[in-house]
Amino acid sequence: MNSITIIGLLAASFTTIAFIPQVLQIVKTRNTNGISLVMYIIFTIGIFCWLIYGILLNDFPIIAANAVTLILASVIVFFKIKHG
């Protein structure tokens, strides 16, 4: 594994992990009042595009980060629609 891949994995890890507290808070409280549905829908579409881009490039850090972030963002969208 080269240093560029390691930097990519670190960046992917931190930006993906940053979503976990928000998801846990929403799942725990079912409160999505401060969350913009439109923003999260647009963001989720963007993350999906990044995932496809990573797959086309066969770039593991991009694929891994965006696959996990897509799941986390989708959970937020789901709870916003269900409980918002």
Image (tube, grey):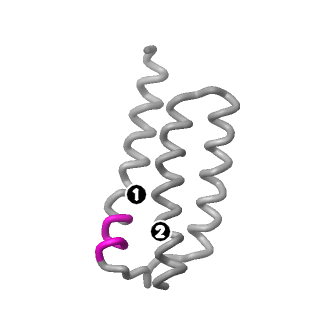
In front of the other: label 1 or label 2? 2
Residue 76, numbered circle? 2
Task: Please provide percent x and percent y for residue 66.
Answer: 53, 45
Determine the CA span between mark 1 and mark 2. Answer: 10 Å
> Where does the N terminus fall, quadrant-wise?
top left
* Element type where label 1 sits in the image: loop
Given residues 3 and 63, the one toward you in this image is 63
Given residues 27 and 4, the one toward you in this image is 27
Residue 57 falls left or right of residue 6: right
Given residues 79 and 35, the one toward you in this image is 79
Q: Is residue 22 above or below residue 70?
A: below
Q: Is residue 41 above or below residue 36?
A: above
Question: What's the residue at 47%, 65% (across, down)?
Answer: 75
Whether residue 67 appears in magenta in the rendering, the answer is no
Residue type beneath disc 1: Phe
- Residue that badge 1 annotates: 19
The stretch in magenta equals: 23-28
Find the residue positioned furthest to the top: 2
Question: What's the residue at 62%, 67% (across, down)?
Answer: 41
Task: Please provide percent x and percent y for residue 76.
Answer: 47, 68
Q: Do callouts 1 and 2 mark residues in contact (Cβ within 8 Å)?
A: yes
For the residue carrying disc 2, how many other residues have a C-alpha within 10 Å: few (<14), some (14-19), or many (20+)?
many
Q: Give whichever of discs 1 and 2 has the lower sequence position.
A: 1
Question: What's the residue at 31%, 61% (across, down)?
Answer: 21
Residue type beneath disc 2: Ile
